Each structure stands twice: as C-alpha cells, then as structure tokens.
C-alpha cells in the first residue's frame, strides 16, 4: 500500500492550498484516513481525519481553517487549507488506518512541505 501526498508549496499568509493523498488501492480498505503535520522542532500532530463512512474529526486549531474530504472514485483524500498562517508551516503527512485484511496496519505518505510566509 502506498499513499502519495502532493499539493504543498510556498504561499503567503492568508492564502490557500489543497493537499491531495492518493492511495494505491481503494480507500475503503482503510477505516480512517487523515492528515498530520510536523513543524520544525515539534512533534507530529493530527490535523484532521475522515472515516470510511465520512465522519470528520478536526484538531481544535484546524476547525476554522481546514476541510478534509474524500473522493472514493479517485481513491483520494483532500485537505483544503484556507486563511493560512506562518504557524501552519510544516510537513504534512497523509495517514491511513487499515481495515479488513489490513486491520491493525498504519500507513504513511511521504509528506508534503507547506511553507507560509508572513
């Protein structure tokens, strides 16, 4: 199983980016998919997640700015990030928690760098 994250880049404060995470197999293979981030010198933290049934969960800091969604036909999970701030600068990682035959397995994408300039 591979998760391919993309969409990061350099954006000015107040700008927007949309991250994509494409899975190498049906995303119904995963109970939950999510986005985490890791800023320099900090621990990795959850940004948002979405279950196979479409239930969303957000970190408190993400509720007003970020939207997670999924396109089952494209095996892709998105993270729409609006009103970005310099403190949102981090490497963003896609994550998937396996279901069925993949139960108990955790998968990570390679990360995509988001840099927000002031």
Image: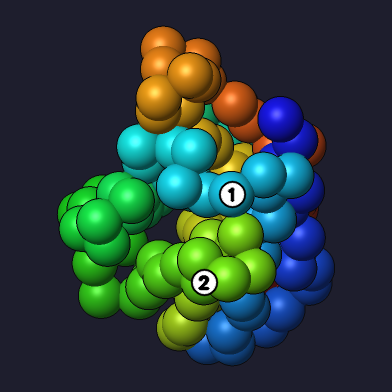
Q: CA distance from mark 1 to mark 2?
A: 10 Å
Disc 1: CA contacts within 10 A as few (<14), some (14-19) or many (>=20): some
Looking at the rendered image, the quarter that the C terminus falls into is bottom right
**Image coords of residue 53 (percent x, y):** 25, 56
**Can you identify the residue that label 2 sits on?**
71
The tag earlier along the polypeptide, 1 or 2, is 1
Residue at the image point whose x is 58% and y is 71% from the top: 73
Above or below residue 114? Residue 91 is above
Residue at the image point whose x is 63% and y is 30% from the top: 108
**Image coords of residue 43 (percent x, y):** 49, 24
**Can you identify the residue that label 1 sits on?**
26
**Image coords of residue 84 (percent x, y):** 51, 75
> Which of the numbered marks, if any, corresponds to residue 73?
none
Above or below residue 72? Residue 60 is above
In this orientation, does residue 79 appear? no
**Image coords of residue 26 (percent x, y):** 59, 49
Residue at the image point whose x is 74% and y is 44% from the top: 24
């Amino acid at each position: 199983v591979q998760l391919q994250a993309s969409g990061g880049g350099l954006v000015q404060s107040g700008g927007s980016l949309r991250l994509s995470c494409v899975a190498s197999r049906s995303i119904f293979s995963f109970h939950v998919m999510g986005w985490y981030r890791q800023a320099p010198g900090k621990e990795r933290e959850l940004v948002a997640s979405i279950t196979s049934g479409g239930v969303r969960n957000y970190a408190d800091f993400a509720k007003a700015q970020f939207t997670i969604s999924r396109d089952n036909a494209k095996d892709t999970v998105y993270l729409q990030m609006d009103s970005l701030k310099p403190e949102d600068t981090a490497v963003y990682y896609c994550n998937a928690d396996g279901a069925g035959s993949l139960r108990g397995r955790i998968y990570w994408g390679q990360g995509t760098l988001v840099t927000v300039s002031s």
